[in-house]
Amino acid sequence: MKLSLSSHHQLLLDALINPSTLTQYTYAQWELLLRLARKVKLLGFLAVELERRKLLDTIPVRVVSQLRSSLIRANKQQQLAFWELDRINWALKSIRVPIIVLKGVAYQLAKLPTAEGRFFVDLDILVPKDDLDQVEKALLKEGWKHREISAYDEHYYRAWSHEIPALIHQERETEIDIHHTISPITSKIKIDSRLLIDAAIASQSGHKILNPTDMALHCVVNLFQNNDLVDNLRDLLDLHDQLQYFASHDSAFWNKLIERANQLRLGHSLYYGMQYSRLIFQTAIPENTEQRLIQKPSVVSQLIMRQLVPLALFPLHPDKASKRAKFARFLLYLRSHWIRMPFYLLIPHLLYKTMLRFKPGK
Amino acid sequence: MIVEQIPVDQFIAQLSHSGIRVKLGPINVLIRTEVPQLAKQLHFLYAYYDIVENEIVDIHTHVLPKFSFNNPFSSFVRFTVDGQSPFPPFPADQALAALEWGINLVIAVRVNHLLMFHSAAVERNGSLILLPAWPGSGKTTLCTALIHRGYRLFSDEFGLMDPISDFFTPIPRLMPLKNQSIQVIRDYLPEAVLGEEIYNTQKGTIAHVRPPRDHIFKTDQVARAKWIIFPKWTANAPLKLEPLAQSEAFLLLASNSFNYEILGESAFRAVTRLIRKCQCYQLVYSDLDSALAMFNKLTDEA
């Protein structure tokens, strides 16, 4: 399978895969690149990559200012998220509940290479479903509160989602998303989150995080199951980073990953994850590894997704968005709902969402 | 080349097609708009800004007409940056206010390589006076008076400080006078150039002061601060300039910065150095004559 991208997508990808070529970029190329990278939340990544290669002195000053500005913001967000983690551990120390840290903060805890410079505005944690009430009550008692949301959204979260409405502390802005599993409870795939929690490991700092296979699986589920993939290039880059890093530290990683995906019945998402990570970022995945997955998307689905996924992952051209890309994104939006909810829930939900668009204030 | 050198018809056409790239101090901004009224206002008020050639533009803005389902018979405009609107549409006759506000917002959100105070800043005899103030304290009015009486404009909104070299960078933008201040400035400074009055904005009536030509031409001349003065306009109050304790000045300045918290330690160190090197005052004034005399005396003594 070969990837053919439009020129602005290629420009962005070249920069991500091979940052040392950036020293050759013209002003016009830089200008476009910065806009695209900002859109997919990768300015901090570029800043770190260039800094590591000691190339910040060789690129235009204006670019350095933008990259440094982003990196400073990313560092601050990381500091805030870690402080929030410290605070919830403090608030929950009296109740003996396993708290598993997910996503960006977990990538930092796992010391993944691309975690530095990564933006994240919230802290994601996973707790056993049976302990959810207890955790929520304890946090509400210690000064956290729910953001104000509509009754519909409240119902959406409580009845159908894999997380509860976000919490924020009264004095701080950092959002905490508390998950009880990693995919909406209405989706066709049911995941027993107990298995994930039991297999969690301790990071060097003593926090609990998902083990390597589960972390990668959570990443693919988020990409190909929970979301519509729009502007999610960063998350695919996270996956690429995890696969490379874990495989280089454990020669049995690929076997473990396939086995675990088969056990949790997450073959679909992992199949796509491995394919697109290899296709776009040239991840060194041994050939045919994904063929050992029990569940695979059908050939027809694969062909359709192949037409849509890159157009959604990569950002639209900021000045001339292609109609094809917009249409691809719309179809993937529908797909994400379709696999997340049964039909009888989906139609009213989409109608409600459409109605909201025409409400005053929009 | 500066904006004024482009014929107005060509300027309007270019704005609606590929946009105009202008240098606003350290930030290059691309402005695109199909709103002819806004284009005419910009040709006049942005007359002295440099057109950016062969340089990277930092912020890409677009002001476009927007149809409203809830209000189909009024015309609205939408401000977007890279295709996204950071705030709801504005009535079309407030397009200039939307653009100016939008650009300020993007600068405030994105720029972290400089420490950014919510402050007016002017320069005299090579040194900078920082005038940090909260909305409603009359800093734009005071700043407008100062820059027409021998002080060089850095900004009426952003004090941009390099946290390594401690130099401030000018970013002379249009200065929005609000409500009664408009008439005050018309009476006091007949030579000040103002744009059209814009009514019923969130802040009432606004008229923008065009920064004088020489001030815009000198945007590359940076300066270090020597005075920090917290001004407060109070009706009929006698002029009062009181020294401010460094500790108090520090707290006021840090809490008035847009990105002090984001910069963290480097901001703490920069503000500490700044406070130690500057004379800090609190100023209460009601009339511009005595305020100007006070500023002259203070900066002459230097």
Image: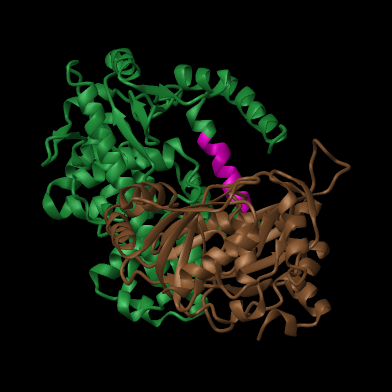
Q: Nearer the viewer, residue A7 or B151?
A: B151
Q: Would residue A310 be seen by someone viewing this image from the given angle? A: no
> Is A13 drawn above or below residue A188 in the view shown?
below
Residue B271 position, x and y percent, is 33, 57
Residue at (14%, 39%) from the top-left corner?
A203
Chain whose colour in the figure is brown: B
Where is residue A284, by image quadrant?
A: bottom left
Chain whose colour in the figure is green: A
Where is residue A14, by image quadrant?
A: bottom left
Q: Nearer the viewer, residue B245 or A148?
A: B245
* Helix, strand or loop for the magenta stretch, by majority: helix
Residue B270 position, x and y percent, is 31, 61
For the N terminus of chain B, the quadrant is bottom right
Relative placement, left or right, of B235 versus A213 is: right
Q: Nearer the viewer, residue A265 or A112?
A: A112
Q: Which residues are magenta?
A: A326-336
Residue at (34%, 67%) from the top-left corner?
A17
> Is B267 drawn above or below residue A162 in the view shown?
below
